[in-house]
Amino acid sequence: MIVPDANLLIYAYDSKSDRQLSAARWLQEMLSGPDTFGLSWLSIGAFLRISTNSRLGSSQLRMSSAMDIVEEWLGCVPFGSSFQARNTG
């Protein structure tokens, strides 16, 4: 299973990053391709926290835009029995 870290998710939407095009292309291929792909809640949370930070200036996303992006990702990732939370207690 391929699970990207927050940096790759952030680069894919940071228009000022020199890594944006390659990160966006890779992410799109993963979301639409045949490989098993997953998203970590930690990476999603970091994407939301960092990409909406006002210190980014013109690269900052509005929270509503960032949430739309996350909803799009979640619509592309199949959730099955292997993704269900397990009771560890």
Image: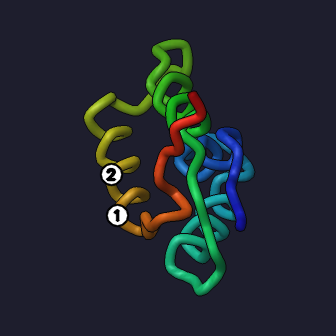
At 54% from the left and 13% from the top, the residue drawn is: 55
Q: In which quadrant is the C terminus drawn?
A: top right
Q: Nearer the viewer, residue 21 or 43?
A: 43
Residue type at mark 2 is Glu
Q: Is residue 46 above or below residue 28?
A: above
Q: In which quadrant is the N terminus drawn?
A: bottom right
Residue indicated by mark 2 = 71
Residue type at mark 1 is Gly
**Colouring chosen for the image of the structure:** rainbow
Percent of width and height locating residue 35: 65, 80
At 38% from the left and 50% from the top, the residue drawn is: 69
Q: Is residue 21 above or below residue 13?
A: below
| Left or right: 20 in relation to 81 | right
Badge 2 marks a residue whose secondary structure is: helix
Q: Quadrant of residue 30?
A: bottom right
CA–CA distance in space, label 2 to label 1: 6 Å
Q: Is residue 74 above or below residue 55?
A: below
Neighbour class for label 1 at 10 Å: few (<14), some, many (≥20)? few
Q: Mark 1 and mark 2 in contact (Cβ < 8 Å)?
A: yes
Q: Nearer the viewer, residue 23 or 87?
A: 87
Q: Quadrant of residue 74?
A: bottom left
Percent of width and height locating residue 8: 69, 48
At 60% from the left and 38% from the top, the residue drawn is: 43
Q: Residue furthest left?
A: 64
Percent of width and height locating residue 56: 55, 21
Q: Nearer the viewer, residue 73 or 41?
A: 41
Badge 1 marks a residue whose secondary structure is: helix
Q: Nearer the viewer, residue 71 or 65?
A: 71
Residue indicated by mark 1 = 75
Percent of width and height locating residue 5: 70, 45
At 47% from the left and 53% from the top, the residue drawn is: 84
| Left or right: 84 in relation to 2 | left
